Image (cartoon, rainbow, N blue to C red):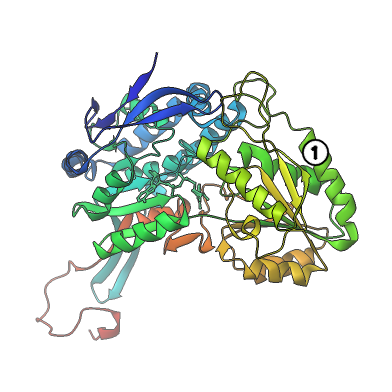
Amino acid sequence: MTFTVSHHIGGRIVTGGRGTSPIHNPSTGERIGDVELADAELVSQAVATAKEAFQSWSQSSLGRRTAILFAFRELMAANAEQLGAIVTREHGKVLSDAIGEVGRGLDVIDYVCGIPQLLKGEFTMQASSGLDVYSFREPLGVCAGVTPFNFPVMCPMWMAPVAIACGNTFVLKPSEADPSASLFIADLWQRAGLPDGVFNVVQGDRHAVAALETHPDVKSLSFVGSTRVGRELHAIGTAHGKRVQALCGAKNHGLVLADADLEFAATNAAASAFGAAGERCMALPVIAVVEQVAEEFIARVVDKAKAIKVADGMTADADMGAIISRSARDRIEATVTEAEAAGARVLLDGRGFHPDGHEDGFWTGPTILTDVTTDMRAYREEIFGPVLVIMRIKDLDEGIELIRDCPFGNGAAIFTGSGQAARRFTREIPVGMIGVNVPIPVPVAYHSFGGWQDSFVGESHIYGPEGVKFFTEAKAVTQRWTEPAAATFHFAGASQASN
Ligand code: NAD
């Protein structure tokens, strides 16, 4: 029995659009359902509904918003396993990882449960005689989010709860590859008491995104996905007067120095390269290891990678599941084949692998390449699959140089026992999120998340303080409540303080 995933607008399921796109279970390759694709008219309906809901939601008290956020948080936590299973079915990642992504989403909801504190403005008493100044932040209006396939729960949670807590209404356009989680989340918002129309979902592809990018009533666009699409969305969105934050692709490097704990570094290198089948923007697909310890480190990583259990995501002890689509699997394996033909050595070959009984699923196993040169596509481009490239470097300087030459700048990690080396590393690389003996340095929700260079377009990073800033606009009020003095033709302010 297949199912159809539709839109959620104004608190109810809405059907229609410009056709459907198939949803697969990557583990079996089976088509399990279809997702409807919104057209411009349907997007307009969602935006109009969100605009209408903004009238009252933007006026709701902080106490009411907080109560709803707490209730939503509790419902997300109580349903984490069910939500995780939905993600595993359509994405392929293992259940524990899918539940983990719900947990990272919960962190952001926790953070915005403190929205009264986050929106507290500033007040200056007696800036001039009898004159006070205060400033605060107001919501924008209808905010839209466009999210990728790899975190169908976490990425929407990076944006929607923050926008809503700030008094905005939201239209989410999830990935068409794994759309079901979005409707489950919409239902939880409703059960938490969020008024209809504050959180809406339009399913769809680039046509739905184009309608959001150009719609005059959409005030902001939050995007997470590939660099090509993020750049285009930023260009079109800003040309249409929106504020845009676009979190884009990545090619993160890990550096292993001779004084690192090699066992710890090898375990974490394998986990971060192959976890979620490498389909994480904060994975470490490149490890640069100093020559001195390279042989030993590589041997350990290969051992760890061989021990990874690749199986259907619902299998209790699975470490790694399937790839999102057949085309992604083919692209990943073609990149490995191309690198091999260009002289790379394949130390562990996952090409052609599938678990028994899953011949039609979208599978490839952990793969490790060495002797890769920086002009190969396997090094230059984001593979977004379970392929680890191990480079040999002379020293820290060469490692830093390698990262500085990489056009992406999402995350990077160093494994070392030296505080001095770590300090140089953190200061000298043009990367947004850095780990010191931490392989996947995703910042906690009360800091903000975002990359540099080709990994980000816009000004404000996502969630945390930058997220609150992104979803609000500043207002400053200069007020006088004393007896009116003689009219002044000067600017009112401290610098004009005369009386
Ligand atoms: P994608 O760019 O193909 O799609 C992202 C979203 O954009 C989807 O909702 C999709 O429907 C839409 N889209 C696709 N093509 C479009 C087009 N031409 N015009 C307008 N919209 C379009 O990305 P993906 O394959 O879903 O996800 C993987 C990518 O996301 C990787 O590059 C990964 O690094 C990146 N990512 C980045 C972060 C981050 O925080 N920097 C986090 C997760 C994923």
Which residue is at the far front?
Answer: 341
Res. 167 in view:
no
**Residue 30 falls left or right of residue 268:** left
Mark 1 surroundings within 10 Å by alpha-carbon count, few (fewer than 14), some (14 through 19), many (20 or more): some
Q: Which residue is mark 1?
A: 304
Q: Is mark 1 within 8 Å of ligand 1?
A: no
Q: Position of residue 89 (x, y in %)?
A: 50, 24
Q: Position of residue 414 (x, y in %)?
A: 73, 58
Q: Amino acid at mark 1?
A: Lys
Secondary structure at badge 1 equals: helix
Q: Quadrant of residue 397?
A: bottom right
Q: Quadrant of residue 197?
A: top left
Q: Quadrant of the N terminus?
A: top left
Q: Position of residue 178 (x, y in %)?
A: 44, 32
Which residue is rendered at x = 53% and y = 59% of the image?
A: 451
Which residue is at the far top?
Answer: 1
Task: Give the mark count.
Answer: 1
Which residue is rendered at x = 74% and y = 46% of the image?
A: 368
Q: Nearer the viewer, residue 347 or 498?
A: 347
Residue 405, placed above or below residue 40: below
Q: Quadrant of the C terminus?
A: bottom left
Q: Nearer the viewer, residue 69 or 288?
A: 288
Residue 180, placed above or below residue 494: above
Res. 241 in view:
yes
Residue 360, placed above or below residue 149: above
